Image (spheres, rainbow, N blue to C red):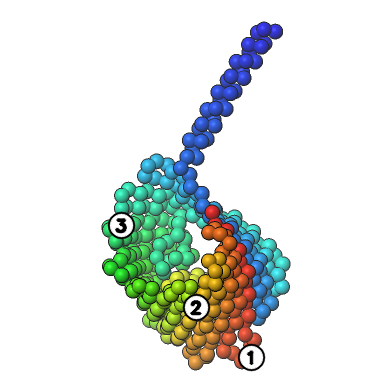
Protein backbone atom coordinates (compact mmCIF):
# COMPACT_ATOMS: atom_id res chain seq x y z
CA UNK A 1 0.00 0.00 0.00
CA UNK A 2 2.88 2.35 0.93
CA UNK A 3 4.54 1.55 -2.41
CA UNK A 4 1.29 2.37 -4.24
CA UNK A 5 1.04 5.73 -2.45
CA UNK A 6 4.64 6.55 -3.41
CA UNK A 7 3.96 5.69 -7.07
CA UNK A 8 0.83 7.86 -7.06
CA UNK A 9 2.78 10.81 -5.66
CA UNK A 10 5.50 10.39 -8.29
CA UNK A 11 2.86 10.26 -11.06
CA UNK A 12 1.13 13.36 -9.71
CA UNK A 13 4.40 15.29 -9.56
CA UNK A 14 5.27 14.18 -13.10
CA UNK A 15 1.90 15.22 -14.49
CA UNK A 16 2.08 18.53 -12.63
CA UNK A 17 5.53 19.22 -14.05
CA UNK A 18 4.42 18.28 -17.58
CA UNK A 19 1.38 20.58 -17.31
CA UNK A 20 3.56 23.45 -16.13
CA UNK A 21 5.97 22.91 -19.03
CA UNK A 22 3.13 22.79 -21.55
CA UNK A 23 1.54 25.95 -20.10
CA UNK A 24 4.88 27.76 -20.21
CA UNK A 25 5.50 26.57 -23.79
CA UNK A 26 2.04 27.70 -24.86
CA UNK A 27 2.48 31.10 -23.24
CA UNK A 28 5.88 31.48 -24.88
CA UNK A 29 4.55 30.42 -28.30
CA UNK A 30 1.76 33.02 -28.35
CA UNK A 31 3.86 35.85 -26.94
CA UNK A 32 3.85 38.76 -29.38
CA UNK A 33 1.03 37.35 -31.55
CA UNK A 34 -1.19 40.16 -32.83
CA UNK A 35 -4.82 39.45 -33.73
CA UNK A 36 -7.03 42.06 -35.41
CA UNK A 37 -10.02 42.14 -37.69
CA UNK A 38 -13.64 43.08 -38.19
CA UNK A 39 -17.18 41.74 -38.05
CA UNK A 40 -19.55 43.44 -40.52
CA UNK A 41 -23.28 42.91 -40.96
CA UNK A 42 -25.18 44.36 -43.94
CA UNK A 43 -28.82 44.28 -44.92
CA UNK A 44 -29.58 45.72 -48.34
CA UNK A 45 -32.51 46.24 -50.72
CA UNK A 46 -32.51 47.25 -54.39
CA UNK A 47 -35.98 48.03 -55.73
CA UNK A 48 -35.28 47.99 -59.47
CA UNK A 49 -34.79 44.21 -59.48
CA UNK A 50 -36.36 43.27 -56.16
CA UNK A 51 -32.97 42.17 -54.85
CA UNK A 52 -32.56 41.64 -51.12
CA UNK A 53 -29.35 40.67 -49.43
CA UNK A 54 -28.11 39.96 -45.92
CA UNK A 55 -24.41 39.54 -45.48
CA UNK A 56 -22.14 38.78 -42.53
CA UNK A 57 -18.44 39.21 -43.24
CA UNK A 58 -15.71 38.34 -40.74
CA UNK A 59 -12.00 39.06 -41.23
CA UNK A 60 -9.40 37.79 -38.76
CA UNK A 61 -5.78 38.82 -39.32
CA UNK A 62 -3.07 37.06 -37.31
CA UNK A 63 0.58 38.20 -37.20
CA UNK A 64 2.90 35.62 -35.61
CA UNK A 65 6.51 36.66 -34.89
CA UNK A 66 9.05 34.07 -36.05
CA UNK A 67 12.10 36.00 -34.87
CA UNK A 68 13.07 39.65 -34.43
CA UNK A 69 12.92 40.29 -38.21
CA UNK A 70 10.49 37.72 -39.64
CA UNK A 71 6.75 37.32 -39.05
CA UNK A 72 4.09 35.12 -40.58
CA UNK A 73 0.87 36.92 -41.57
CA UNK A 74 -2.46 35.27 -42.38
CA UNK A 75 -5.98 36.56 -42.96
CA UNK A 76 -9.08 34.36 -42.68
CA UNK A 77 -12.24 35.64 -44.36
CA UNK A 78 -15.63 34.16 -43.47
CA UNK A 79 -18.59 35.29 -45.52
CA UNK A 80 -22.24 34.29 -45.15
CA UNK A 81 -24.32 35.84 -47.94
CA UNK A 82 -28.10 35.18 -47.90
CA UNK A 83 -30.03 36.13 -51.04
CA UNK A 84 -33.79 36.38 -51.41
CA UNK A 85 -36.39 37.47 -53.99
CA UNK A 86 -34.56 36.60 -57.16
CA UNK A 87 -31.20 37.99 -56.11
CA UNK A 88 -28.22 36.60 -57.99
CA UNK A 89 -24.75 37.65 -56.92
CA UNK A 90 -21.51 37.64 -58.87
CA UNK A 91 -20.85 34.05 -57.89
CA UNK A 92 -24.11 32.89 -59.50
CA UNK A 93 -26.14 32.06 -56.37
CA UNK A 94 -29.88 31.99 -56.96
CA UNK A 95 -32.84 33.08 -54.90
CA UNK A 96 -32.98 31.90 -51.31
CA UNK A 97 -29.44 30.50 -51.25
CA UNK A 98 -27.07 30.99 -48.35
CA UNK A 99 -23.54 31.30 -49.71
CA UNK A 100 -21.05 30.46 -46.94
CA UNK A 101 -17.37 30.75 -47.73
CA UNK A 102 -14.24 30.23 -45.65
CA UNK A 103 -11.19 31.63 -47.37
CA UNK A 104 -7.60 32.06 -46.24
CA UNK A 105 -7.04 34.93 -48.66
CA UNK A 106 -3.66 36.15 -47.36
CA UNK A 107 -0.76 34.06 -46.05
CA UNK A 108 2.80 35.28 -46.36
CA UNK A 109 6.11 35.76 -44.57
CA UNK A 110 7.14 39.32 -43.75
CA UNK A 111 10.79 40.35 -43.37
CA UNK A 112 11.55 43.79 -41.93
CA UNK A 113 15.05 45.19 -41.46
CA UNK A 114 15.38 48.93 -41.04
CA UNK A 115 13.77 50.61 -44.04
CA UNK A 116 13.51 47.38 -46.03
CA UNK A 117 10.39 45.17 -46.09
CA UNK A 118 10.01 41.96 -48.10
CA UNK A 119 6.73 39.99 -48.30
CA UNK A 120 6.68 36.46 -49.72
CA UNK A 121 3.48 34.50 -50.29
CA UNK A 122 -0.16 35.14 -51.23
CA UNK A 123 -1.06 38.77 -50.50
CA UNK A 124 -2.69 42.00 -51.66
CA UNK A 125 -0.77 43.83 -54.39
CA UNK A 126 0.09 47.40 -53.29
CA UNK A 127 -0.97 50.29 -55.54
CA UNK A 128 -4.15 52.06 -56.58
CA UNK A 129 -4.41 50.12 -59.85
CA UNK A 130 -4.10 46.77 -58.05
CA UNK A 131 -5.75 47.57 -54.70
CA UNK A 132 -8.50 44.97 -55.16
CA UNK A 133 -6.10 42.27 -56.40
CA UNK A 134 -4.50 39.34 -54.60
CA UNK A 135 -1.65 37.32 -56.04
CA UNK A 136 1.10 34.88 -55.12
CA UNK A 137 4.67 36.13 -55.28
CA UNK A 138 7.00 38.66 -53.74
CA UNK A 139 6.69 42.34 -52.77
CA UNK A 140 9.73 44.44 -51.81
CA UNK A 141 9.50 47.94 -50.31
CA UNK A 142 12.20 50.36 -49.18
CA UNK A 143 11.63 53.53 -47.19
CA UNK A 144 14.00 56.48 -47.54
CA UNK A 145 12.86 59.32 -45.29
CA UNK A 146 9.68 60.76 -46.79
CA UNK A 147 9.76 58.43 -49.79
CA UNK A 148 9.00 54.74 -50.32
CA UNK A 149 9.78 52.74 -53.44
CA UNK A 150 8.75 49.19 -54.17
CA UNK A 151 8.21 46.41 -56.67
CA UNK A 152 6.01 43.34 -56.93
CA UNK A 153 6.13 40.21 -59.07
CA UNK A 154 2.96 38.10 -58.91
CA UNK A 155 1.15 35.23 -60.57
CA UNK A 156 -2.29 33.65 -60.12
CA UNK A 157 -4.16 36.96 -59.96
CA UNK A 158 -7.74 37.70 -61.04
CA UNK A 159 -6.37 39.64 -64.00
CA UNK A 160 -4.26 36.85 -65.47
CA UNK A 161 -2.72 33.46 -64.82
CA UNK A 162 0.50 34.85 -66.28
CA UNK A 163 2.96 37.12 -64.49
CA UNK A 164 2.03 40.57 -63.21
CA UNK A 165 4.91 42.94 -62.45
CA UNK A 166 4.51 46.30 -60.76
CA UNK A 167 6.68 49.15 -59.52
CA UNK A 168 5.44 51.84 -57.14
CA UNK A 169 6.78 55.04 -55.62
CA UNK A 170 5.21 57.39 -53.07
CA UNK A 171 6.27 60.25 -50.86
CA UNK A 172 5.74 63.79 -49.65
CA UNK A 173 7.37 67.09 -50.53
CA UNK A 174 6.18 69.81 -48.16
CA UNK A 175 2.37 69.93 -48.37
CA UNK A 176 2.30 67.73 -51.52
CA UNK A 177 1.78 63.95 -51.50
CA UNK A 178 2.81 62.03 -54.61
CA UNK A 179 2.13 58.48 -55.77
CA UNK A 180 2.91 56.63 -58.98
CA UNK A 181 2.49 53.04 -60.17
CA UNK A 182 3.35 51.15 -63.34
CA UNK A 183 1.96 47.66 -64.01
CA UNK A 184 2.83 45.19 -66.76
CA UNK A 185 0.60 42.13 -67.17
CA UNK A 186 2.06 39.51 -69.52
CA UNK A 187 0.05 39.14 -72.74
CA UNK A 188 -2.75 41.36 -71.37
CA UNK A 189 -1.87 45.04 -70.93
CA UNK A 190 0.35 47.61 -69.30
CA UNK A 191 -0.99 50.48 -67.21
CA UNK A 192 0.10 53.41 -65.09
CA UNK A 193 -1.38 55.64 -62.40
CA UNK A 194 -0.27 59.08 -61.19
CA UNK A 195 -1.74 60.88 -58.19
CA UNK A 196 -0.90 64.15 -56.43
CA UNK A 197 -2.54 65.85 -53.43
CA UNK A 198 -1.74 69.16 -51.75
CA UNK A 199 -3.01 70.33 -48.35
CA UNK A 200 -3.39 73.99 -47.39
CA UNK A 201 -4.76 74.40 -43.89
CA UNK A 202 -8.27 72.90 -43.81
CA UNK A 203 -8.37 72.52 -47.62
CA UNK A 204 -7.03 69.81 -49.91
CA UNK A 205 -6.85 69.61 -53.71
CA UNK A 206 -5.78 66.71 -55.88
CA UNK A 207 -5.58 65.16 -59.32
CA UNK A 208 -5.30 61.56 -60.48
CA UNK A 209 -4.88 59.89 -63.87
CA UNK A 210 -4.92 56.22 -64.85
CA UNK A 211 -4.40 54.70 -68.29
CA UNK A 212 -4.49 51.12 -69.57
CA UNK A 213 -2.91 50.04 -72.87
CA UNK A 214 -4.19 46.57 -73.89
CA UNK A 215 -1.72 44.45 -75.85
CA UNK A 216 -2.52 44.51 -79.58
CA UNK A 217 -5.20 47.22 -79.25
CA UNK A 218 -5.40 50.98 -79.68
CA UNK A 219 -8.43 51.36 -77.39
CA UNK A 220 -8.44 54.52 -75.27
CA UNK A 221 -8.97 53.34 -71.68
CA UNK A 222 -8.40 56.03 -69.07
CA UNK A 223 -9.81 57.77 -66.00
CA UNK A 224 -8.97 61.33 -64.94
CA UNK A 225 -10.09 62.86 -61.65
CA UNK A 226 -9.78 66.27 -60.00
CA UNK A 227 -11.10 67.03 -56.53
CA UNK A 228 -11.10 69.65 -53.78
CA UNK A 229 -12.15 69.14 -50.16
CA UNK A 230 -12.29 71.16 -46.96
CA UNK A 231 -13.28 70.81 -43.31
CA UNK A 232 -14.53 73.73 -41.24
CA UNK A 233 -15.67 72.92 -37.74
CA UNK A 234 -18.42 70.29 -37.88
CA UNK A 235 -18.87 70.60 -41.67
CA UNK A 236 -16.78 68.83 -44.33
CA UNK A 237 -17.26 68.56 -48.07
CA UNK A 238 -15.71 67.55 -51.36
CA UNK A 239 -16.26 68.40 -55.02
CA UNK A 240 -15.09 65.85 -57.61
CA UNK A 241 -14.89 65.86 -61.40
CA UNK A 242 -14.15 62.65 -63.31
CA UNK A 243 -13.82 61.73 -66.99
CA UNK A 244 -13.20 58.43 -68.79
CA UNK A 245 -11.72 57.57 -72.19
CA UNK A 246 -13.68 57.07 -75.39
CA UNK A 247 -13.45 53.27 -75.10
CA UNK A 248 -13.62 52.78 -71.34
CA UNK A 249 -12.18 53.60 -67.94
CA UNK A 250 -8.64 53.04 -66.73
CA UNK A 251 -9.04 49.89 -64.62
CA UNK A 252 -7.01 46.73 -65.23
CA UNK A 253 -9.47 44.16 -63.91
CA UNK A 254 -12.96 44.26 -65.44
CA UNK A 255 -14.38 42.45 -62.39
CA UNK A 256 -12.96 44.69 -59.65
CA UNK A 257 -13.22 48.41 -59.04
CA UNK A 258 -10.13 50.06 -57.61
CA UNK A 259 -9.56 53.43 -55.82
CA UNK A 260 -8.27 54.90 -59.07
CA UNK A 261 -11.91 55.05 -60.23
CA UNK A 262 -14.64 57.43 -59.01
CA UNK A 263 -17.66 55.93 -57.21
CA UNK A 264 -20.47 57.60 -55.29
CA UNK A 265 -22.44 54.41 -54.60
CA UNK A 266 -24.43 53.35 -57.65
CA UNK A 267 -22.92 55.84 -60.08
CA UNK A 268 -19.24 55.52 -60.91
CA UNK A 269 -16.67 55.58 -63.69
CA UNK A 270 -15.82 51.86 -63.51
CA UNK A 271 -16.33 50.20 -66.93
CA UNK A 272 -17.92 53.38 -68.34
CA UNK A 273 -16.84 54.79 -71.70
CA UNK A 274 -16.97 58.48 -72.66
CA UNK A 275 -18.26 59.54 -69.24
CA UNK A 276 -18.17 62.95 -67.55
CA UNK A 277 -19.42 63.38 -63.99
CA UNK A 278 -19.31 66.06 -61.31
CA UNK A 279 -20.24 65.33 -57.69
CA UNK A 280 -20.74 67.24 -54.44
CA UNK A 281 -20.45 65.36 -51.14
CA UNK A 282 -21.02 67.01 -47.73
CA UNK A 283 -21.16 65.79 -44.11
CA UNK A 284 -22.18 67.42 -40.83
CA UNK A 285 -21.19 66.09 -37.40
CA UNK A 286 -24.36 66.73 -35.39
CA UNK A 287 -22.72 65.31 -32.26
CA UNK A 288 -19.40 63.51 -31.68
CA UNK A 289 -21.29 60.26 -32.37
CA UNK A 290 -23.93 61.22 -34.96
CA UNK A 291 -23.27 62.58 -38.45
CA UNK A 292 -25.37 63.31 -41.54
CA UNK A 293 -24.20 63.01 -45.13
CA UNK A 294 -25.73 64.22 -48.40
CA UNK A 295 -24.26 63.80 -51.89
CA UNK A 296 -25.30 64.41 -55.47
CA UNK A 297 -23.60 63.36 -58.72
CA UNK A 298 -24.62 64.38 -62.22
CA UNK A 299 -23.06 63.43 -65.51
CA UNK A 300 -23.24 61.98 -69.01
CA UNK A 301 -22.32 58.60 -70.44
CA UNK A 302 -22.00 59.38 -74.13
CA UNK A 303 -25.18 61.37 -74.75
CA UNK A 304 -27.18 59.82 -71.86
CA UNK A 305 -27.75 61.88 -68.72
CA UNK A 306 -27.21 60.06 -65.42
CA UNK A 307 -27.46 61.17 -61.79
CA UNK A 308 -27.49 59.90 -58.22
CA UNK A 309 -28.79 61.40 -54.97
CA UNK A 310 -27.56 59.91 -51.70
CA UNK A 311 -28.29 60.41 -48.01
CA UNK A 312 -26.74 58.75 -44.96
CA UNK A 313 -27.04 58.83 -41.16
CA UNK A 314 -24.09 57.43 -39.19
CA UNK A 315 -23.86 56.57 -35.50
CA UNK A 316 -20.46 55.84 -33.94
CA UNK A 317 -21.31 54.24 -30.62
CA UNK A 318 -17.64 53.72 -29.76
CA UNK A 319 -14.24 53.80 -31.39
CA UNK A 320 -14.66 50.24 -32.64
CA UNK A 321 -18.40 50.11 -33.37
CA UNK A 322 -19.98 52.02 -36.26
CA UNK A 323 -23.43 51.75 -37.81
CA UNK A 324 -25.11 53.65 -40.62
CA UNK A 325 -28.23 53.75 -42.75
CA UNK A 326 -27.77 54.83 -46.38
CA UNK A 327 -30.31 55.45 -49.14
CA UNK A 328 -29.69 56.31 -52.77
CA UNK A 329 -31.68 57.02 -55.92
CA UNK A 330 -29.94 56.45 -59.26
CA UNK A 331 -31.35 57.67 -62.59
CA UNK A 332 -29.72 55.82 -65.48
CA UNK A 333 -31.24 58.16 -68.07
CA UNK A 334 -33.44 55.52 -69.68
CA UNK A 335 -37.08 56.70 -69.67
CA UNK A 336 -38.52 53.19 -69.92
CA UNK A 337 -36.91 52.02 -66.65
CA UNK A 338 -37.54 53.10 -63.06
CA UNK A 339 -34.90 54.80 -60.97
CA UNK A 340 -32.78 52.41 -58.97
CA UNK A 341 -33.56 52.85 -55.25
CA UNK A 342 -30.96 51.27 -52.99
CA UNK A 343 -31.02 51.08 -49.17
CA UNK A 344 -28.44 49.63 -46.78
CA UNK A 345 -28.10 49.11 -43.04
CA UNK A 346 -24.59 48.32 -41.85
CA UNK A 347 -23.05 47.54 -38.46
CA UNK A 348 -19.28 47.09 -38.22
CA UNK A 349 -17.19 46.08 -35.22
CA UNK A 350 -13.39 46.21 -35.40
CA UNK A 351 -10.93 44.61 -33.02
Instruction: Give residue 336's mark.
Output: 1
SS class, disc 3: strand
Among numbered discs 1 and 2, the one appearing first in the sequence: 2
Q: Where is residue 217 shown, x and y percent of the image? A: 39, 79
Neighbour tally class for label 3: few under 14, some 14-19, many 20 plus, Cα within 10 Å: some
Q: Is residue 164 toward the left or the right of residue 19 in the image?
A: left
Looking at the rendered image, the disc whose residue lies closer to the viewer, 2 or 3, is: 2
Examine the rendered structure and indicate whether residue 213 appears above or below residue 156. Answer: below
The numbered mark, 1 or 3, whose residue comes first in the sequence reads: 3
Residue beneath the point at 30% across and 57% down: 143
Foreground mark, 1 or 2? Answer: 2
- The percent coordinates of residue 175 (x first, y second) are 31, 70
Q: Residue shown at 37%/60% (left/top)?
A: 152
Q: Is residue 151 left or right of residue 262?
A: left
Q: CA distance from mark 1 to mark 3?
A: 55 Å
Q: Please say if 43 is above or below 267.
A: above
In-image side of 187 versus 62 (left or right):
left
Residue on which the image places disc 2: 282
**Which mark is first along the chain, 3 or 2?**
3
Query: Where is 105 relative to 221, above or below?
Result: above
Rendered location of residue 232, percent (x, y): 43, 75
Q: Is residue 266 visible?
A: no
Residue 239, image quadrant: bottom left
Instruction: Using the numbered discs, state the Cα–Cα distance from disc 2 to disc 3 in whole angstroms.
Output: 35 Å
**Within 10 angstroms of label 1, few (less than 14), some, or many (20 or more) residues?**
few
Label ID, residue 143: 3
> Could you tell me if residue 132 is visible in this image?
yes
Mark 1 and mark 2: span between their CA atoms?
31 Å
**Mark 1: secondary structure:** loop
Q: Of the residues tagged 1 and 3, which is closer to the observer?
A: 3
Amino acid sequence: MRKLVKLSLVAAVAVSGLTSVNAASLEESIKGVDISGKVRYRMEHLNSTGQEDQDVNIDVKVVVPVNDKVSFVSNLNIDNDNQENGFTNAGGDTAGNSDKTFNLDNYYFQYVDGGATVLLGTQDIPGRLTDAETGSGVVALYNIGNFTVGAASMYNTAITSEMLNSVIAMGTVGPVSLLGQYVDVDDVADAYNLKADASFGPAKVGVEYSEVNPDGSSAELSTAKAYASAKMGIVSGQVTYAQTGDNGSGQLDASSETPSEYLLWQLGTWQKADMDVIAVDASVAITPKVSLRAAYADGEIGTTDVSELLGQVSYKMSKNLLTYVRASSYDNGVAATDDSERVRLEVKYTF
